[in-house]
Image (cartoon, helix red, strand yellow):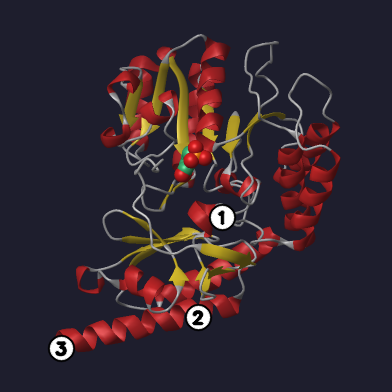
Amino acid sequence: MKLFDVYPINNIAIDKAKGSYVWDDKGEQYLDLYGGHAVISIGHTHPHYVERLTNQLNKVGFYSNSVKMPLQDELAEKLGKISGKPDYQLFLISSGAEANENALKLASFHNGRKKIIAFKKSFHGRTSLAVATTDNPAIVAPVNQTSNVIFLPFNDIAALEACFKEQGNEISSVIIEGIQGVGGINVASESFLQAIRRLCDQYGSVYIADSVQCGYGRSGKFFSHDFAGVNADIYTMAKGMGNGFPVAGIIIAPHLQAKHGMLGTTFGGNHLACAAALAVLEVIEKENLLQNAAEVGQYLMEELKKIPQLQNVRGRGLMIGFDVPEQFKDLRKNLLWKHKIFTGEAKPNVIRLLPSLALRKKDVDQLLEAIKEEIEVSTESIAK
Ligand SMILES: Cc1ncc(COP(=O)(O)O)c(C=O)c1O
């Protein structure tokens, strides 16, 4: 049997990983500033994570949501404390798309409405509602097309107000990434998030904070939406939550009420998933990783801004992007193949950095040196 060929892959087989490094099957070492789509939050194969998962697997790996799950209560307690939202309610699933799917559905159950506001350049996943709220027609199948989703320009308060004024009583929810990831590292302004909160309150709509990529400490705060000083009604999370184990969640404000059978899943919140999520939070807390993400992120951003050839350096914490001018278009490729550094991209010319929250300054320096060398080499070859 062949694999269904949907991924353009790099010809590298990763065989071993530790902290911010991975090694291929030939023993070559790479600096990982991408974390496999922003997933590696506490570092690869962290000893506490490996131990907690191993111990859990030796006890019980899985049972479904038909029995009591003390580990889920433990996770909810810890997540409430670290995220600063102790009065929210936790529902566990297994992927980011599933988190958004359930959030959008729950909002609609709550207010009985159908319309959703999403934003240009958004990415919310590939399942039916998640993809319908994603601004990329190429990945929306005909069966997923719906007139219930309204796409508005990002960070445009006037457009948002106008839309609410016209059809606010029909809007079930507004879904927004605090920092757009796939769309190219675009930070939602604080005033825009505050306007969403105000309008959702005024019209009885649900504010959904997609924190799948920008959440879980990546921005230096637990949720990047926290920078605006307002609370969303539902936060969706995945990626960094399990440091590679497929676990995702939505946390739900107290005024949204649960009913038996309203949402459900087979795999979500199983024993192993909870152990992974707990291990991540324990390491985030013990190693002060939010502070590290803020500090090392600031250093990285400041140093990148000093390189005049890189344009629009932007982001927060360890979620950083910059535009690469046409003359240095091979930069990302050369960082990987010549300097052995993994980075991410966003079309057409953005390099995205999404490293572990435990990244050290010396790793940043390795990247900066490589970028400077590449820029020098390209500039010289153009001059010749
Ligand atoms: C902001 C955001 N939301 C949702 C998703 C979908 O997550 P998953 O791939 O786990 O379904 C992603 C994935 O990249 C994402 O970046």
Q: What residue would you read off at disc 3?
A: 383
| Distance between the alpha carbons at the discs numbered 3 and 1 | 39 Å
Q: Amino acid at mark 2?
A: Gln
Any atom of ligand 1 within 8 Å of the CB at mark 2? Answer: no
Q: Nearer the viewer, residue 157 or 24?
A: 24
Residue designated by label 2: 366
Q: Is residue 3 above or below residue 132?
A: below
Q: Residue at x 46, y 11 (%)?
A: 113
| Residue hosting label 1 | 219
Say which amino acid is labelled 3: Ala
Classify 10 Å Cα crowding around label 1: few (below 14), some (14-19), many (20 and above): many
SS label for mark 3: helix
Three-letter code, disc 1: Ser
CB at disc 3 and ligand 1 closer than 8 Å: no
Q: Which numbered disc, 1 or 2, marks the residue that appears first in the sequence? A: 1
The answer to which image quadrant residue 134 occupies is top left
Relative image position of residue 190 (x, y in whole percent): 49, 45
The 10 Å Cα crowd at callout 2, few under 14, some 14 to 19, many 20 or more, is few
Q: Position of residue 77 (x, y in %)?
A: 81, 37
Which is nearer the N-term, disc 3 or disc 2? Answer: 2
> What residue is at 29 percent from the left and 53 percent from the top?
347
Q: Which marked residue is nearer to the observer: mark 3 or mark 1? A: 3
